[in-house]
Image (spheres, coloured by chain):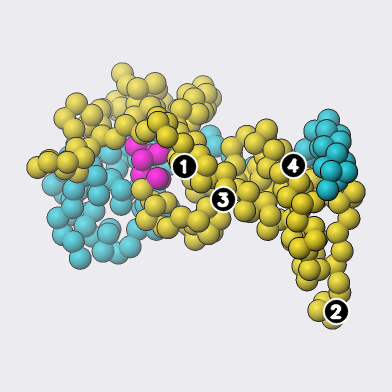
Amino acid sequence: MKFMISCDEATSICDKNQYREATLSEKISLSYHLFICKYCKKYTKQNNLMSQIFGKYLTPCDGSEKMSDEAKEELKKNVKTELKNN
Amino acid sequence: MSDNIKHTLNPDKWIDLYADYLYNYAITRVDGQDLAKDLVQETFFSGIKGKDNFRGQAAERTWLVSILKRKIIDHYRKINSIKGQKEVRMNFYEEGDKKGSWIEERVPQSWGNDADKKIENAELKDALEGCIKNLPEKYRMVFLLKTVQNYETEEICNELDITPSNLWVIIHRARIQLRNCMEENWFKN
């Protein structure tokens, strides 16, 4: 395990941890780093807030979107032409 | 026995039968309705060109989805290889003794004691969407797949043909940029 990590690495682990996918050794390295680095500590706190914001304001497509009728008509026309040419 | 069923292709009916399904498949993976529509059309075109290669083992829809998946990978490769596109500005030294440390003038700034309250505001959504639009497309695509559509890391890696370490580098860069942008446009006192 790598004990001393850079701020770039620490914040990378912090990002990965937002998705609960950091490994145990990564989390240990991060905790140690946060103990000695106030900037990364601040980053971590703000990053948690960013995750909250993403969850609150960004909604996934639920798979129920339909292609518009006009788009389908155009698609039909184009597919027809393509079929003729093949 | 499904093994005995020989599937056939009926391109005349593809749009009525599969356009919505494929469109949904695309729009949960790529950014924007127009792009999703284009990819569906390209899928149908490739299907027509390749219809003689269809062996009838898979159902028509499954076969079309496999073509669409390929189109999504191709699209990702294309946006990934565009030369001279804007890169994400990182906050860390990239070389030298200080490699990996914060660049002094780009360290995280204070967001004030009321940062928690600042996120309870409907206008934040506009600021956030503006920041997301500013991400280079390759970062935006991976970030949204992971963060908003909640796809598994493995699934994204398979679908875009990238490694998990690629994925985490992209996520890191995207989040750093979004944080900087929201700091500038929303949280700075």
Q: Residues within 10 Å of mark 2 (few under 14, many from 20)?
A: few
* Residue A25 x, y percent position in the rendering: 26, 64
Distance between mark 4 and mark 1 Cα atoms = 22 Å
* Residue B9 x, y percent position in the rendering: 86, 59
From this viewpoint, which residue is outermost toward the front?
Answer: A85
Q: Residues within 10 Å of mark 4 (few under 14, many from 20)?
A: many
Q: Which mark is residue B41?
A: 4
Residue linked to disc 2: B4
Residue linked to disc 1: B80
Name the residue: 42% across, 34% down: B83
Chain B color in figure: yellow
Q: Is residue B112 left or right of residue A85?
A: left
Name the residue: 87% across, 64% down: B8
Q: Secondary structure at mark 1?
A: helix
Contact flag, marks 1 and 2 (Cβ < 8 Å): no
B133 vs A79, nearest the viewer: A79
Distance between mark 3 and mark 1 Cα atoms = 10 Å
Q: Chain of mark 1?
A: B
> Does the image show residue B124?
no
Relative to A69, say whether B155 is above or below.
below
Q: Is residue B127 left or right of residue B22?
A: left
Which chain is assigned cyan?
A: A
Q: Which residues are magenta?
A: B170-176
Q: Earlier in the sequence, mark 4 or mark 1?
A: 4
